[in-house]
Image (cartoon, grey):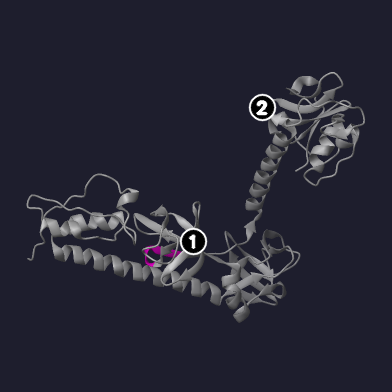
């Protein structure tokens, strides 16, 4: 069997994933080993990948073994890309795109009176499984159900629109890869990306992909990335509830952070100015007004705003804490921020500032 010298082997650049490398070592008759250090930015090759150093008692490796692994990896890549294309084509050939100002209910039966299992929003997609009396049975995200066909784009029009409502992600499939300032292997390096990382594809040119990274836009060689098409799908009732709860909490935290910047400002009876003076209900009203929500300038009226929260253990940042003739904003951890009185002004206090009567969630 023809052998390669150790010196020549060191010159070989093998563009393989770590799995490929392991397979290469296994196939070599001389039990080669890879240097233990990890690839650094200085070792990243122009096209991506890391230098593999092989060694053994006689510092030789099997050329046939190397070629077998390379050929095997190329075959796998070809099959994976073919599968990706087939999956994409299968979807777009049976695509339904929601065409509505807001959303469509996805129902359990082809009947407007049946319960809905989720919602599909404008430009979200589903795969058509069946048609029945003006209804489409679709599979979208985690749910399967019926939508009115009249509110969907289907057929050739949907296929032509697929690239407009979807987007591509490039998943790096080599250990390390340069992202460059232009679609050229000699262009300046913008950053280095790693195996398994995904980046939004914005354009193509000369075998390169323009991708969006945290270091800015740049070009990566397309051959070293797997392309995954992404669409927006329907949302189940459970998924919607989780999303809304997360959004509500995040908005409450943001409101508290906004409110804290006014601590130390004066209290003013009947006032609504966060800087020049406000009373308790003027404080909560002005805070929520900043987020486009109107509340009455009366503590008694705010007692009925939003929805009730059952117990302080279920309260979250941003909730309005109701006292007798007084209101405050809950911060979390048993604390409130509020326009307390003319002596204290806007302050942070414990929730036991007064006797708690109720909790209202506005977001």
What is the CA distance from the residue labelled 2 to the residue labelled 1?
Answer: 42 Å
Find out whether residue 226 is within the magenta segment.
Answer: yes
The residue that disc 2 covers is 333
Which stretch appears magenta? 223-227
| Magenta segment, prevailing SS (helix, strand or loop) | strand
In the current view of this chain or complex, which residue is farthest to the right? 270
Position of 246 with respect to 318 (left or right) is left
Q: Percent x, y for residue 56?
A: 11, 50
Quarter of the figure that contains the C terminus:
top right
Q: Percent x, y for residue 248?
A: 70, 43
Position of 278 with respect to 190 (left or right) is right
In the displayed structure, would residue 190 be above or below residue 73?
above
Q: Percent x, y for residue 51?
A: 25, 55
Residue at 57% across / 61% down in the picture? 141
Residue at 68% across / 48% down in the picture? 244
Query: In what element is the residue under mark 2?
Result: loop
Find out whether residue 156 is within the magenta segment.
Answer: no
- In the depicted view, which residue is nearer to us: 308 or 328? 328
Q: Which labelled disc corresponds to residue 65? A: none
The residue that disc 1 covers is 211
In terms of sequence position, does the residue under pointer 2 or pointer 1 come before the other? 1
Residue 316 in sight in this render: no
In the current view of this chain or complex, which residue is farthest to the top? 343
Residue 192 in sight in this render: yes
Q: Percent x, y for residue 359?
A: 78, 33
- In the depicted view, which residue is nearer to us: 357 or 282? 282
Residue at 21% across / 60% down in the picture? 12
In the current view of this chain or complex, which residue is farthest to the bottom? 156
């Amino acid at each position: 069997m023809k052998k390669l010298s150790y010196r020549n082997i060191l010159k070989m650049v093998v563009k393989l994933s770590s799995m490929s490398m392991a397979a290469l070592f296994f196939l070599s008759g001389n039990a080669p080993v890879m240097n233990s250090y990890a690839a650094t930015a200085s070792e990243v090759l122009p096209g991506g990948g890391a230098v593999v150093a092989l060694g053994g008692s006689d510092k030789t490796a099997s050329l046939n073994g190397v070629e077998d692994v390379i050929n095997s990896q190329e075959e796998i890549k070809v099959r994976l890309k073919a599968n990706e294309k087939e999956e994409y084509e299968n979807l777009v050939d049976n695509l339904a795109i929601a065409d509505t100002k807001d959303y469509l209910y996805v129902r359990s039966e082809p009947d407007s009176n049946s319960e809905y299992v989720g919602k599909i929003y404008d430009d979200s997609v589903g795969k058509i499984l069946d048609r029945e009396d003006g209804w489409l049975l679709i599979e979208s995200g985690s749910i399967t159900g019926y939508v009115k066909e009249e509110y969907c784009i289907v057929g050739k029009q949907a296929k032509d629109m697929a690239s407009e409502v979807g987007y591509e992600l490039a998943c790096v499939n080599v250990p390390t890869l340069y992202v460059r300032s232009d679609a050229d292997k000699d262009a300046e390096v913008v950053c280095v990306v790693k195996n398994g990382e995904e980046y939004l594809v914005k354009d193509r040119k000369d075998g390169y992909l323009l991708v969006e990274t945290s270091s800015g836009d740049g070009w990566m060689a397309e051959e070293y990335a797997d392309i995954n098409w992404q669409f927006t799908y329907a949302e189940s009732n459970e998924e919607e509830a989780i999303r809304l709860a997360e959004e509500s909490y995040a908005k409450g935290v943001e409101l508290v952070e906004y409110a804290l910047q006014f601590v130390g400002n004066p209290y003013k009876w009947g006032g609504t100015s966060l800087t020049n003076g406000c009373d308790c209900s003027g404080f909560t009203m002005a805070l929520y007004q900043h987020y486009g929500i109107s509340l009455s300038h009366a503590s008694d009226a705010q007692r009925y705003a939003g929805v009730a929260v059952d117990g302080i253990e279920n309260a979250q940042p941003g909730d309005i804490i109701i006292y007798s003739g007084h209101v405050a904003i809950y911060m979390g951890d048993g604390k409130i921020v509020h326009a307390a009185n003319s002596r204290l002004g806007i302050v942070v206090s414990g929730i036991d500032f007064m006797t708690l009567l109720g909790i209202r969630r506005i977001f």
